[in-house]
Amino acid sequence: MNENRRQPKIVLVAALISALASFVIYLPSLSFDFVNWDDLMYVHNNTAIRGLNLEAVFTSFANGAWIPVTLLSFSLDYAFWGLDPFGYHLSNAILHGANAFLVALLATRLASARGGLRPKALFIIALSAGLLFGLHPLKVESVAWVSERKDVLNAFFFLLGLHAYLSYARGRKALSYALTLVFFVLSLLSKPMTVTMPLVLLILDFYPLERSRTDGWKRLVLEKAPFFALSMATGLLNVWSHTVDSVIISAEALPLEGRLHITARGYLFYIYKTLIPVNLAPLYPRDFPAGLDTLFAVYVLALSAITALAVYLCRWSRVCVSVWAYFLMTLLPIIGILQVGMHAAADRFMYIPGIGFAMLASAGAGWAVRRRAKAFFPVLLAVFMVSAIFSAMTFRQQAVWKDSLTLWGRQIALYPDNAQGFKGRGTAHAIAGRYGDALEDFRKAADLDPSDSSMHIDLGKAYMHLGDGRNSYLSMKKAHELGDPAAYRYLKDLEAWGAVSGE
């Protein structure tokens, strides 16, 4: 009886430690600026977030996505802080701390579904899950970048939804089911990445809840029908909105075989970065051949081997196959089949999928303590050592997001042959009025990617600000020849100004 009363308290202590550590590690980010990568679009120049205008936030699309709850959170920040980035970073850090708290509690609830755990094992499970999630360097992009409020808010409602579902699975109360549905909707309206949440609920039904054995799959799938309907509607809406905004990469630009290559490579890439989170970049470019080649076959074989191992381990426990299925499903919306943007991968995409690996590690730690009580302190020491290493890496990595110059400087350092870093840094210089520095970066960007018309337009603008009409005209003409309609207006303005073509 006393032991049963102690369990919630000791779990709560572990969850609070995780939340506090996950918040404190991001205190340096409170002094960071906005960066010239989506922050201007989402916040700085976004009139929809001003004045708590519900109509504006619910009828606006941000970079092709319908995310009214995220925009509403920005509206609340704007009401308190105006355009002071401190408040926006503070909100991100608080939400991340709350997510670490929810992950810690979720780990113990899932572990308790199997029963037979003493307080020390529960404490280790909660602490390791919360700290490994909250302090992992892959989370930096989602927390230290204001625009990725989408991630931390999306995960917050996703985790609340999972907690509500566990309550429903235990008591079958209509209120818990309704709350699960409500949190799912709020999650989708924060970021549509969680369209696969109905599949996650079915994974939980498989293990550790094992409802598939008692209720049967047909009933469980029918139970999730409203969730699947909302997922389909959200998916169709966002495909349409991204298509309208011309954000989705066309089949001509990236054929199916290229997308399959990126998908197979992406799954292994994220596993690698989870285990060895070094050389984290703001943008991982598609700078590799993508097709049904030998490397693709290697990737598929590796993924097949991991899947076979997870299934084989079901002889002893279903936890591995459940975590593996969770990883595959939660990454599915952004893994590469529907390609948006120029990246091959992104750290932020692991914010929710990474929860599964944290759960798996915590299950292993809890199993060790359950198997042998004397293992508590060695396991606790190991958790603190890994957390300390991750904290040091996270502390260092978040400095990349201090401002636009440090952000793009990091990109250039890691990918000096890719144009995007120079374009981003050049834009940062131009915004600050340093057109000489901007010109140098834009020249480098145009040399690295001469087929990108926007590079030549940026270069032309820099020449224009420096009073060099002739070179501005030549740059704009090049952009026009590449088919960029925006260049035509600049050419007419330059002709009216008296610039010569040089022909």
Image (cartoon, grey):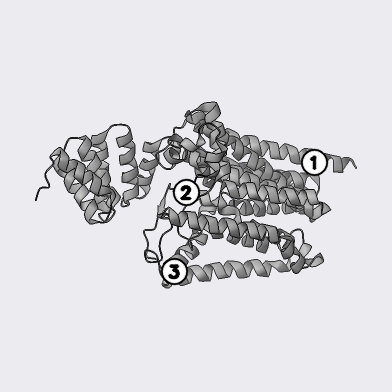
**Which element is circle 1 on?**
helix
C-beta proximity under 8 Å, tags 1 and 2: no
* Residue named by callout 3: 256
Q: Hey, which quadrant is residue 423 in on the image?
A: top left
For the residues labelled 3 and 1, the Cα–Cα distance comes to 50 Å
**Mark nearer the N terminus (1 vs 2):** 1
Q: Residue furthest front?
A: 55
Q: Residue furthest left?
A: 503
Residue at coordinates 29% horizontally, 49% vertically from top-left? Answer: 454
Q: Which mark is residue 278?
A: 2
Between residue 491 and residue 106, name the one nearer to us. 491
Q: Where residue 346 sits: x, y (%)?
A: 47, 51
**Mark nearer the N terminus (3 vs 1):** 1
Three-letter residue code for mark 1:
Pro
Q: Residue furthest right?
A: 1
The quadrant of the image that shows the N terminus is: top right
Q: Where residue 256 sits: x, y (%)?
A: 44, 69
**Is 453 on the left-hand or right-hand side of 125?**
left
Q: Which is closer to the viewer, label 1 or label 2?
A: 1
Three-letter residue code for mark 2:
Val
Between residue 244 and residue 36, name the one nearer to us. 244
**Which element is circle 2 on?**
loop
Residue at coordinates 43% horizontally, 57% vertically from top-left? Answer: 248
Between residue 420 and residue 297, name the one nearer to us. 420
Q: Which mark is residue 8?
A: 1
Three-letter residue code for mark 3:
Leu
For the residues labelled 3 and 2, the Cα–Cα distance comes to 30 Å
From where the camera sits, is residue 145 visible?
no
From where the camera sits, is residue 123 visible?
yes
